[in-house]
Image: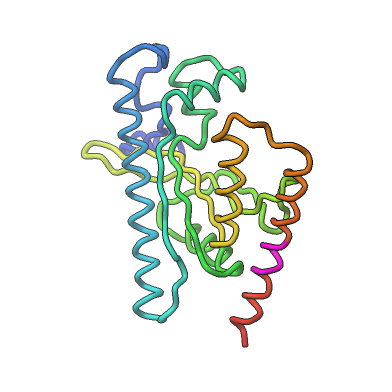
Amino acid sequence: MKKNKMKELGIVEMKNFLSYDEKIEEKTNTFEKLMTIYEMAITELETKLNILQKEFKVFYNYDLIDHINTRIKQPESIVNKMKKKGYELTYKEMIENINDIAGIRVICQLKDDIFKIRNLIEKIPGIHIEKEKDYVNHPKESGYASYHMIVKVPVNLSKQTIYVKVEVQIRTLAMDFWASLEHKMKYKTDKEVNKKTSKELVNYAKIVNKMDNKMALMNEL
């Protein structure tokens, strides 16, 4: 859609919604407004996913989505990430470069359902996929497996519609268990994970992958 047409319809990108001259570290209600819009985007997408979850449960007697978790990145985490990446501490830099401020994690039971959910998200009216990373078929060296998407979600305000970036992670229950434990060990403690533990985590990730594959085969019987 052309920019002038978007403006005519009251549709704007998140980065054009507010003034970004102030520093993130300054205490203003601008930051609160931005976080509110991110929260609205999460609510919008979560509602759509809850509808899909209920549709498959009631109409097809199938638990496509086991559960959904949402979160807004904490201010200190946003600032630390921007400093680490070398970005200026402005709202414009934050909106353009930090894609995981608003996050939704969709947990399913079977590996094949990850891609079903991904395809259903793509079909949601108004949702635009910006980026995708398939860590399911191509896990990280650490063993981490999940499907990542950065999507733009339309937030319909009274005077205009704003497109807001939301990070979506889709993974199985087994993948989520492994990822949660790995994250806790690496980021939530002061102890550095040694090479032996890292190697064990990779081996456990492989076991999780085998289990997911076997469960998928059992489901087809």
Q: Magenta span has 91? A: no
Image position, residue 201 (x, y; %): 70, 50
Is 195 placed left or right of 48 in the picture?
A: right
190 is higher (above) or lower (below) than 184? above
| Along the viewing direction, whichever of 21 and 85 lies nearer the viewer | 85
Q: Residue at x 31, y 42 (%)?
A: 40
Image position, residue 34 (x, y; %): 34, 29
Is 38 placed left or right of 118 in the picture?
A: left
Image position, residue 70 (x, y; %): 40, 47
162 is higher (above) or lower (below) than 20? below
Is 8 placed left or right of 109 in the picture?
A: left
146 is higher (above) or lower (below) than 32? below
Splitting the image into 4 quarters, where does residue 182 fall?
Answer: top right
Is 12 placed left or right of 135 in the picture?
A: left
Q: Residue at x 61, y 83 (%)?
A: 220
Q: Identify the image's colour scheme: rainbow, by chain, secondary structure or one colour.
A: rainbow
Image position, residue 90 (x, y; %): 46, 16
| Along the viewing direction, whichever of 90 and 113 lies nearer the viewer | 113
Q: How many marks?
A: 0
Q: Residue at x 28, y 37 (%)?
A: 160
Q: Residue at x 41, y 74 (%)?
A: 56
Q: Main secondary structure of the magenta part?
A: helix
Q: Quadrant of the C terminus?
A: bottom right
Q: Magenta span has 210? A: yes
Taking the view exactly as shown, the residue that stands out farthest to the left is 158
Magenta residues span 207-212
